[in-house]
Image: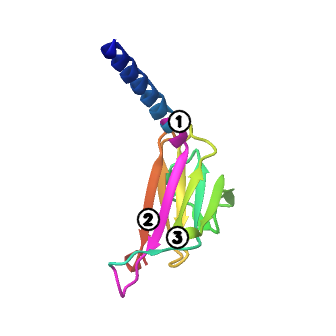
């Protein structure tokens, strides 16, 4: 009887754990966690939160498709054609934020603009089906 009870409890724990893992995976779909920092020439060992840096998301585009475009205040411009970001956010608190993607099925490109250095960088992903954790460090080497 004790063995049957123990087996039943183990089975319930395993099945609950499996459901919890599936729910966590579903929750993490479409999540982008971003941290943006900068370094100075005076101290390359310290990463300072790049407050008020901006993040722009463009769906259906890879960064290689955007090479000929000029970045102007969140908009990408090429020969009179303008691509507007599908989502954008300003990173205030400690240069970090979590973004919930509006579309997880399409490829997307994230462009981050440093508030401190006024430089940009881009990252592309095939979809938002997996959680994206992105840490970007701008520095004097990127000037």
Where residue 89 sits, quadrant-wise, is bottom right
Q: How far apart are marks 3 and 2 (CA)?
A: 13 Å
| Tag nearer the camera, 1 or 2 | 1
Residue located at (52% from left, 51% from top): 32
Q: Name the residue under label 2.
A: 136
Mark 1 residue element:
helix
- Classify 93 as above or below 3: below
Nearer the N terminus, badge 1 or badge 3?
1
Nearer the N terminus, badge 3 or badge 2?
3
Where residue 141 sits, quadrant-wise, is bottom left
Nearer the N terminus, badge 1 or badge 2?
1
Give the percent coordinates (x, y) of residue 44.
34, 80
Mark 2 residue element:
strand
Q: How crowded is mark 2: few (under 14 residues within 10 Å), some or many (20 or more)?
A: some
Give the percent coordinates (x, y) of residue 124.
48, 51
Give the percent coordinates (x, y) of residue 85.
65, 56
83 or 106: nearer the viewer: 106
**Number of marks present in the image shown:** 3
Q: Residue furthest front?
A: 1
Q: Magenta region: which residues?
A: 25-44
Q: Is residue 35 magenta?
A: yes
13 or 139: nearer the viewer: 13
- Classify 24 as above or below 8: below
Give the percent coordinates (x, y) of residue 72.
63, 68
| Tag nearer the camera, 3 or 2 | 3
Tell me whether circle 3 and circle 2 mark residues in contact (CB < 8 Å). no
Q: Name the residue under label 3.
A: 94
Residue located at (54% from left, 40% from top): 27
Q: Name the residue under label 1.
A: 26
Mark 3 residue element:
helix
């Amino acid at each position: 009887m004790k063995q049957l009870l123990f087996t039943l409890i183990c089975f319930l724990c395993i099945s609950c754990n499996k459901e919890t893992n599936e729910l966590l995976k579903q929750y993490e779909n479409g999540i982008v966690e971003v941290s943006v920092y900068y370094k100075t020439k005076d101290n390359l060992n310290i990463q300072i939160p790049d407050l008020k840096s901006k993040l722009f998301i463009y769906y259906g585009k890879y960064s290689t498709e955007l090479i000929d475009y000029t970045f102007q205040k969140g908009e990408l411009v090429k020969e009179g054609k303008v691509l507007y970001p599908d989502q954008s956010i300003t990173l205030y608190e400690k240069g970090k934020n979590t973004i919930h993607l509006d579309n997880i099925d399409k490829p997307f490109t994230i462009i981050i603009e440093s508030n401190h250095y006024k430089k940009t960088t881009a990252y592309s992903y095939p979809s938002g089906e997996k959680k994206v954790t992105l840490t970007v460090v701008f520095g004097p080497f990127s000037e």
